[in-house]
Image (tube, helix red, strand yellow):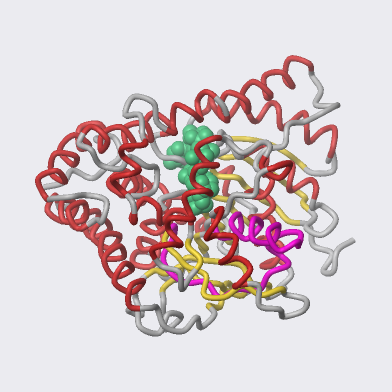
Amino acid sequence: MSKNDKRYSVVIAGGGSTFTPGFVLSLIANEDRFPLRKLKFYDNDADRQKKIGDACAIIMKERAPEIEFSYTTDPEEAFTDVDFVMGSIRVGKYEMRDHDEKIPLKYGVNGQETTGPGGMAYGLRSIPAIIQIIDWMEKYSPNAWMINYSNTIAIVAEACRRFRPNSRVINICDMPVAIMTRMAQICGLNDYHDLDVNYYGLNHFGWWKEVRDKNTGKDLTPLLKEHLSKNGYWIGGEFDKDTEESWAETFKKAKDCFALDPEALPNTYLQYYYYPQYEVSNADPNHTRTDEIREYREKLVFEECARIVKAGTAKGNLWEASVEHSNYIVDICHAIAYNTHEKFFANIANNGAISNIDPDSIVEVPCWFGSDGVQAMATGEAGVFERGMIMEQQTCEKLVVDAYEQKSYTKMWQAFALNKTVPDALVAKKILDDMIPVNKPYWPELK
Ligand code: NAD
Ligand code: G6P
Ligand code: MN
């Protein structure tokens, strides 16, 4: 039995997410150190959730029958008696991600899930849904924590800071640790747990100042810079045998991001801000990442779930679903549950973590995770170039939340026009005007 003998109750919000089976497998795999008594799914799409829920019920029955499992679309049932909410919702589902990607591309602008106009559109959709989930959690389980992956994280985090400043919600991203697992491989280590880092910036917009071997203290930064200058974060071989082509390109493209700013090791998402024209020329406006996911991840996950339900068993080989993504959120719940003060990453109000950035800006920095939440690490100063980049991008993120709060067309237009991925205000306006009708069910009416 565990250190404090407590067994935890978890609800996955976004039960129909493609990542949900992965969360379930990671929770089961970590049961010895993070024991559960209850696992629930919550989604507002009953049909989608049922397909994943019925398969997971079989997995749970076979592998963890001691954990009570259920799924529901009823908020009271979902959020009552829980210790952790794992947030994995996608407001508007892939249908809306498709618009986020394809509308900007029509105007020669980067079309991407969490960056540029698409990312801002997605953020604006997510704000009310996440606030609603926080409110249900606080009403039905006032001591619970929400660990939220639901994008666009920078915008969601700014909305949480403004509208629910005292809520127990931590907005996280797996990209720093996914890149760090690559860094560990490059250095002959196992994974992100083996590294100690100084990293700073915004979500999908950050830089590593320093990377060290956690056990020996050895500075690994020079070795990583050497690798980056030749291969980006690409490793190849056995390690990358299942890496999808578009992700392979992303890891390789980090080489060009590093070339622009060789002082720091870049987050891969900087490619969209440093090289927007390349991204657009490399994109197919009729076949974007959403199409790839529908053809691969979503198809695989739902086919596997259907196969399990049909067979009535999940015995035998189960597909490996985004292990890193799900292990990371379980690591974080564990750190909070057992007050471990391990260092992970969170998107939180700066308050001095980056010394020359506004205190009330949301930043992504290393934080110590414990039972009282997160404590940010002091990362020092942002460089001149990075600070300039951060100021522009964080203003866009704030403007989106202003647009939500004030129902302001102008604020949203300014957010698009200011963004580094958008060449001018007229293009920004055309994109926004195309986005408004398709986002009608989710956005406030912008005036
Ligand atoms: P998905 O579309 O497969 O699943 C999302 C689910 O959320 C769907 O079943 C949908 O019905 C449900 N949903 C939508 N609105 C809801 C609401 N208001 N209440 C309850 N449920 C709702 O999406 P996915 O590709 O599995 O991704 C899930 C989320 O995780 C997305 O927000 C994605 O951007 C995010 N993500 C974040 C990170 C990160 O680093 N932060 C990493 C990976 C994925
Ligand atoms: C990384 C990012 C997430 C993003 C995801 C998109 O994990 O950290 O924020 O949602 O990639 O991946 P996908 O495979 O859905 O394009
Ligand atoms: Mn992310």
Query: Is 182 included in the stretch rendered in magenta?
Result: yes
Residue 175's place in the image compared with 66, above or below, is below
- Decide which of 433, 263 is in the foreground and name it: 263
**Does residue 189 appear to the left or right of 16 in the view shown?**
right
- Give me the residue at 80% from left, 26% from top: 314
- Give me the residue at 36% from left, 63% from top: 158
- Give me the residue at 31% from left, 37% from top: 281
Outermost residue on the top side: it is 310
Residue 87's place in the image compared with 262, above or below, is above
- Decide which of 363, 285 is in the foreground and name it: 285
Q: Position of residue 182 (x, y in %)?
A: 64, 55
Outermost residue on the right side: it is 1
Q: Position of residue 302 (x, y in %)?
A: 61, 24
Image quadrant occupied by the N terminus: bottom right
Q: Position of residue 126 (x, y in %)?
A: 38, 47
Query: Is 68 included in the stretch rendered in magenta?
Result: no
Dividing the picture into quadrants, the one containing residue 279 is top left
Q: Position of residue 267 (x, y in %)?
A: 48, 59
Asked if residue 108 shows in the view, the reply is yes
Give the residues in magenta. Answer: 176-204
Dividing the picture into quadrants, the one containing residue 160 is bottom left
